Image (tube, helix red, strand yellow):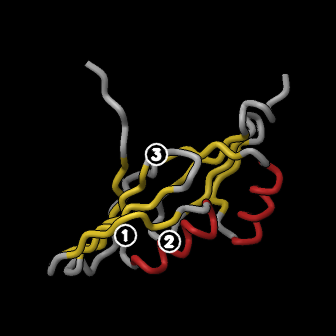
Amino acid sequence: MKYKMIHENYNVSDLDASLKFYKEALGLEEVSRKESDSFTIVYIKNEESDFELELTQLKNHPQSYDLGECEFHLAFEVDDYQASYQKHSQMGCICFENPMMGIYFIEDPDGYWLEIVPSKKEVTC
C-alpha cells in the first residue's frame, strides 16, 4: 500500500490577508475553492509541486487560533536562498534563523511557521 501526501490544512482568521501573504512570500496561487454558510476553503499551490496548502476560514470563529508552541511547520526548498532571504527580510516575516543549519523560518499572518531551506544544489560541504 502506498500513501501520497496531497495537502495540509491551516485555519486562518483573514483569508484575503493569508492569500496575499502566501502569494507574495512563496508564490502560491489559488487552485480551487469550496464555500458554505459556515466556512470557506481555498487550496493553494505552485508549479513546483502537486502538494497543496488548504486554507480554511471558519465564519463564526472570532478568537485567534491556539498554535501551541509552533513546533509544527511546513518546509519549502528554494533554489536561490539568498534572494529568498532578502525578500522575506524586506517583508518583515522572518521569525527565526538557524545559521548553523543554514535555514530560517517565516511566519504567516496567523502565526504559522514555514521553514525555508536551500536546494541541495546550493548546499556546499
Left or right: 3 in relation to 103: left
- Residue 23 figure quarter: bottom right
Q: Residue 2: x percent and y percent? A: 30, 22
How many marks are shown on the rendered structure?
3
**Contact, CB < 8 Å: mark 2 with mark 3?**
no
Quadrant including the N terminus:
top left
Residue highlighted by disc 2: 109
The amino acid on which the numbered mark 2 sits, given as a three-letter code, is: Pro
Residue highlighted by disc 3: 50
**Contact, CB < 8 Å: mark 3 with mark 1?**
no
In the picture as drawn, the residue positioned furthest to the top comes out as: 1
Q: Nearer the viewer, residue 104 or 66?
A: 104
Q: CA distance from mark 1 to mark 2?
A: 8 Å
Quadrant including the C terminus:
top right
Counting residues from the start of the chain, the first of labels 2 and 3 encountered is: 3
Mark 1: few/some/many CA within 10 Å (<14, 14-19, 20+): many
Q: CA distance from mark 2 to mark 3?
A: 24 Å
Left or right: 108 in relation to 35: right
Q: Disc 2 on helix, strand or loop?
A: loop
Q: CA distance from mark 3 to mark 1?
A: 22 Å
Q: Residue 38: x percent and y percent? A: 16, 77
The amino acid on which the numbered mark 3 sits, given as a three-letter code, is: Asp
Counting residues from the start of the chain, the first of labels 3 and 1 encountered is: 1
Residue highlighted by disc 1: 12
